[in-house]
Amino acid sequence: MEATYYFDPACPFTWRTSRWLVGVAAERDVTVHWRAFSLTILSGGNAPEEYRSMMAAASRALRLVEALAADQRNAEAGAFYTELGTRTHDAGVPLSDDIVAASAEAAGLEDVKAILDDPSWDEAVRASHEKAFASAGPDIGSPVLWIEGAPRAVHGPILSEVPDHPEALAIWDAVVPLAHSGTFFELKRGRG
């Protein structure tokens, strides 16, 4: 089964959901494709001042994600995101340009500075974001998950923490039929 995970690397909820997805993918024989979803685009570039440098770093990282997708280097995009999330969300450190560069290097990606600094990749980021938004929106954010055979993508699932193994599989086994349903559109509860 194929799944496409559209993500913004600055979002901690998105990170936890990605770790859930990585955890179930091998056991449920799912190939995950990593694609860009931009909270900067979603907000129209109007992030609060304290988040702007983090959002700029996320935008640069998403350029690399889309460049890797264009070259069908999916495993490397996944490794890059793993390095980003480990250095930011797991470490409690805000995303920065230095972390983006260090994560690319740790993932074994060479000569990426030109991609990170190349605004021509912004159009590929926007196209990926718009595809995800059109498939799951309106009123959504990061992450967006499309599962093979589903008529539309879904926003989420949003997880407060990475679930243990049995719960992780149970969530996947619940999400798949909901995603495939043409009539289902929302299941939600407060963060309390």
Image: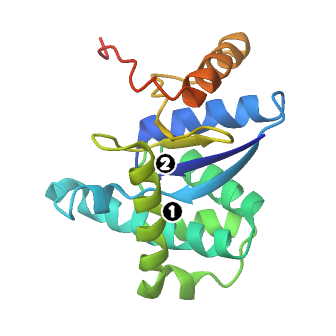
Disc 1 residue crowd, few under 14, some 14–19, many 20+, Cα 10 Å: some
Q: Which mark is residue 99?
A: 1
Answer with mark 2 or mark 1, whichever residue precedes in sequence: 2
Q: Is residue 72 left or right of residue 140?
A: right
Q: Amino acid at mark 1?
A: Ile
Q: Residue at x 30, y 43 (%)?
A: 138
Does 125 appear above or below 184? Answer: below
Looking at the image, which is closer to me, 18 or 187? 187
Can residue 91 be seen in the rendering of this structure? no
Residue picked out by circle 2: 88
Helix, strand or loop at disc 1?
Answer: helix
**Local secondary structure at mark 2:** loop
Q: Nearer the viewer, residue 182 or 163?
A: 182
Q: Is residue 144 visible?
A: yes
Answer above or below: position of 71 versus 131.
below
Q: Residues within 10 Å of mark 2 (few under 14, many from 20)?
A: many
Which image quarter holds the N terminus? top right
Provide residue 38's location: percent of width, then percent of height: 38, 58
Q: Which quadrant does the C terminus fall into?
A: top left
Quadrant of the image occupied by residue 76: bottom right
Q: Percent x, y for residue 140? A: 33, 41
Tell me: 81 left or right of 91: right
Residue type indicated by callout 2: Thr
CA separation, marks 2 and 1? Answer: 8 Å
Question: Measured from the top left, where is residue 149 in percent x and y?
Answer: 67, 39
Callout 2 touching callout 1 (CB < 8 Å): yes
